[in-house]
Amino acid sequence: MDFDGKIALVTGAGSGIGAATVRALVFRGAKAVYACDIDEAAARRVVAELGSATPLGMDVACADQVSAAFDTVLAAHGRIDVVVHAAGVDDPGSKQRMYEAAEQNRPPEVLAHLDDTAWRRIMSVNLDGTFYVLRAAVRAMRETGGAIVTVGSSSAFDTLTGYPHYAASKAGVHALSQAVAKEVAPFGIRVNTVAPGPVDTAMAARTPPHLRAAMIANGFRGYAMPEELADNILYLASPGAANVVGAVLLSNGGRFTV
C-alpha cells in the first residue's frame, strides 16, 4: 500500500497504460485517483468498479482544459501527490504506409507525404500536451512536493524508419521531462519518464498480424502488457524511487539498451 492516502491524476486513462495505472493506484491504496481522458465515456468505463476513482474529460492538447482538471482536483483535496501523464497518439496513416512498404520490400517514403496537419496533431498531443501537464503539475506541487511520471517511447532512441514525427515528439518528451526534473527537484518534486517498447494497447492493435509475429521472431520478448508498464510507472512514483530524478526508464524487453 505504498500509495496509501495519496491523491493522483492520470492522463490517457481511458485505455491502455493510463487505464492500467489508474487501476494499480487504486489497488495500492490511493485515496483518490482522477482518470482524465479526451474520451470521458472511456474513462467512466475504466473507473466503473473502482470506488476511489473519478473520471474527468480532458484534452491534453488544450491548456485550458488541463488547468481546469488540476483546479478540480485541488478544489476537492487541496493537493496532488502523483501525476502520471500517459496520454499520447500515433499516426495511423503513416503507420499504414510503413506497413505497406515493408510488405513490398521498399522504403516507406513517409516524410514526403507527411502533411502539416498530421505533424501538428502528433506534436500538439504528445509534446505540447506534456508541457501543459508538467506546467500544471508543478504549479500544483510547488508547496507540497510530489511525483510526476511522463510516458515517452523507446522509439526516441531506436527511431523507426518512416516515423519521424512520432520519434521527434517522444524525444521532446524525454528532454522536456529531464529539464523540468532538474528545475523542480529543490521543491521536492520528482520527475521521471518511462520509455516503453511495444505495448499491447489499442495503438498496437492496428499492427498487422505478420508484423506482430516478427516482433518476437528474433528472440525478444515482444509486446508488453499495459499492467507491466503501470508497475514501472508506479515504481518511479513511489517512495522506493526517492533517489531517482530525471531518469528515462527503458521498458522494452531488452530490444536495445543505451
Image (spheres, rainbow, N blue to C red):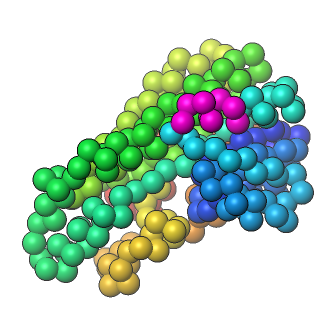
Judge by depth and name the residue closer to the eye, 139 or 124: 124
Residue drawn 51% across the image and 24% down it: 180
Figure quadrant of residue 77? top right
Q: Magenta segment: does it hold 67?
A: yes
Figure quadrant of residue 108? bottom left
Horizontal arrangement in the rendering, residue 107 relative to residue 132 (left or right): left
Task: Name above or below for residue 199 compared with residue 57.
Answer: below
Can you give x and y, in whole percent of width and height, for residue 145 in the image?
72, 23
Res. 108 visible in picture: yes
Task: Name above or below for residue 28 compared with residue 81.
Answer: below
In the current view of this chain or complex, which residue is farthest to the left?
106
Can you give x and y, in whole percent of width and height, for residue 102 in the image?
19, 75
Can you give x and y, in whole percent of width and height, for residue 71 in the image?
74, 29
Task: Name above or below for residue 220 compared with residue 110.
Answer: below
Res. 245 visible in picture: no
Judge by depth and name the residue closer to the eye, 250 or 19: 19
In magenta, the rendered stretch is 62-69
Q: How many marks?
A: 0
Figure quadrant of residue 69? top right
Residue drawn 75% across the image and 59% down it: 44
Horizontal arrangement in the rendering, residue 184 relative to residue 47 (left or right): left
Can you give x and y, in whole percent of width and height, for residue 37 in the image?
63, 51
Main SS, magenta region, reads: helix
Judge by depth and name the residue closer to the eye, 187 or 117: 117
Horizontal arrangement in the rendering, residue 231 relative to residue 198 (left or right): right
Residue drawn 84% across the image and 28% down it: 75
Q: Magenta segment: does it hold 256?
A: no
